[in-house]
Amino acid sequence: MDRRRGASAARRVGRAVAGVAVALTIVVAPSASRAQPSIFPTSGALFGAFVQPGSHTGPDRRSALTSFESLVGRDIAIERVYYFWDQAWPTADDAWTRDAGRIPFISWNAARTDGTKAKWADIASGVYDSVIQARAADLIAFGGPVIFSFHHEPDGDVAAGTPAEFVAAFRHIHAVFDAAGVTNVTYAWTMTAWSFRSSQAASYYPGDDDVDVIAADGYNWYTCPGVSGPWRSFTNIFAPFHTFGQQHGKPMIVAEWGGREDPATPGRKATWIDEASTQLKEWPDIVGVLYYDADKGCARWVDTSPSSLASFQAMAADPYFNPPPTISITSGPAVATTARSATVRFAAPGAAGYRCVLDGGPPTACDSGKWSRTGLALGSHVFETWAVDGSGAATTDHTRWAWTIVPWATIDVQDFAFSPTSRTPAQDTAVLFRFLGPSQHTVTDTSGLGLFDSGPLPAGTTYTVPVLGAGQYPFACTIHPSMTGALKVGLVATPSSGSTTTAFTIQWAVGQAPTGYVFDVQIKRPGTTTWKALATDTTGGQLAFTPDKGAGTYSFRARTQVSGGTASTQWSVAKSVTVG
């Protein structure tokens, strides 16, 4: 059996601490599509592999893959990876392969490590939704592009269920990932090449709406122990699969391919590899080809003979399988967002690095495939990124992401009250005060910190107050002192519950405190009524906390104060986590 991603400029408002009075117009950009762009090249095919660790390559996944790349004379663009149902992924090794510029092609089987099955019908009915949601959260945190295939080669695992149950399970996992906000996944449906020839594949097809790329695993089984068949060409093996993909208008990937030597005809495997290289150029809708470099009952190493290795090295060096890096953005801020921080993730298979530009500024290196900023101004922003090739030159291919930061909420300033009198903005956002008059009023910080003061403003103007961190920020109109209000910024504690070994993240600010300001954080432990210091005069915005007094409820609060001074905001409303 075969193994198996330009707004019109709004006026810039808001800087570190001071508010800014403006007449604000927000225009949401019709920027880059929010749909995930293709990770595949517009011409040519990405070159990839699965490399089995062992004495032939290297003792672990990283050394084996590095050894393979050295052997064939190039870095690969896609790495095939396999996981059982009860294994957590993406892993540190997947992050390593992502950071090296490769795309992990992850196959997630419904079989567990002990050989039992998570039945497709149970997956489809929601029995395992907590497992699927955990993988979704890990994919979002992973950030980089992933080609994902649920239970590759289902036609070879009838014990897991029927074709209809497989289809339902595939669709359900896709739906759960979508609901969780996963945007960095390309969904691959992977069958044996033989299933397309035997007309079995169609019954397992989840449908065009759920499949992004069709993949097949196929081999020349000649001389393989126990399963040997006649010598078959690459074209013969994959032609029915290619026809199916064409009928559905989908890009395709040869997800596994390989073969043994013919003992009676030296050089025959080398000719077979040459034929595969030639045929793939005749099938331009095949956008990736991944060799299965392994010995699992049938030795298919690329270097089973000098001639085979030479042919494979020639294919690896062929420009067709080295298309220029095509960069795509896999995730970024929403088109309209209140957050004044932003993270954009991007990838270009085969790129040696990246250059990033914000709002037409100077380019900076961003080789990790991730760009982040905090304290961004309200208004419109445009992020652009280019791939860098092996010579260090930026490619002509680039992409952009545009978004607009809008105020989290508005407070109307009118005769003679603030409406509403309080708001609860999120961290690292801002509040827009709209002066309706007809009298002049001010919005002035009364905490003693001197954070903001609009001065007298007439009707028809606006004033923006950026948020620093957790705390309650009182304000008033100095012309009409009876006009008062407050901004109530809370902490964030994640997760909301856990055990005594859970590492909770307590966040009171996004990023560092502005120069001249610090934060205080307090904790109230189970069984006590007293607040104790957890962090004092810190400029950081978060910490990791592991429960230190057993089970129960832990509460947290924070405030902002002048560094070395006595003026501060009021304490924020308490945020609690439950420890069982």
Image (cartoon, rainbow, N blue to C red):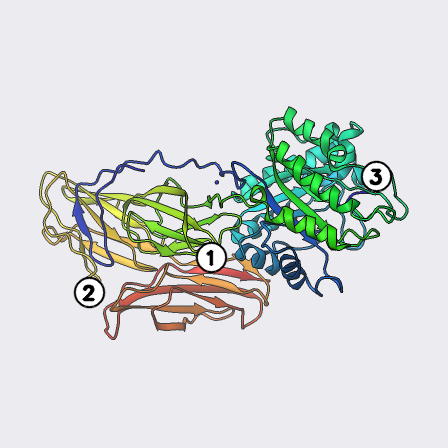
Q: CA distance from mark 2 to mark 3?
A: 84 Å
Q: Which residue is mark 2?
A: 448
Q: Is residue 86 above or below residue 120?
A: below
Q: Is residue 539 left or right of residue 479?
A: right
> Observer-nearest residue: 519 or 528?
519
Q: Residue at x 87, y 39 (%)?
A: 229
The quadrant where residue 148 appears: top right
Please state the horizontal and vertical placement of residue 428, each as a whole percent of the image: 34, 54
Residue 130 visible in the shown view: no
Label count reads 3
- Disc 2 crowd rating (10 Å Cα; few below 14, some 14-19, many 20+) is some
Q: Residue at x 40, y 59 (%)?
A: 491
> Observer-nearest residue: 158 or 468?
158
Q: Secondary structure at mark 2?
A: loop
Please state the horizontal and vertical placement of residue 18, each as a whole percent of the image: 20, 57
Q: Which residue is mark 1?
A: 368
Q: Which residue is mark 3?
A: 231
Q: CA distance from mark 1 to mark 2?
A: 42 Å
Q: Residue at x 9, y 42 (%)?
A: 439
Q: Is residue 474 left or right of residue 461?
A: right
Q: Secondary structure at mark 1?
A: loop
Q: Nearer the viewer, mark 3 or mark 1?
A: 3
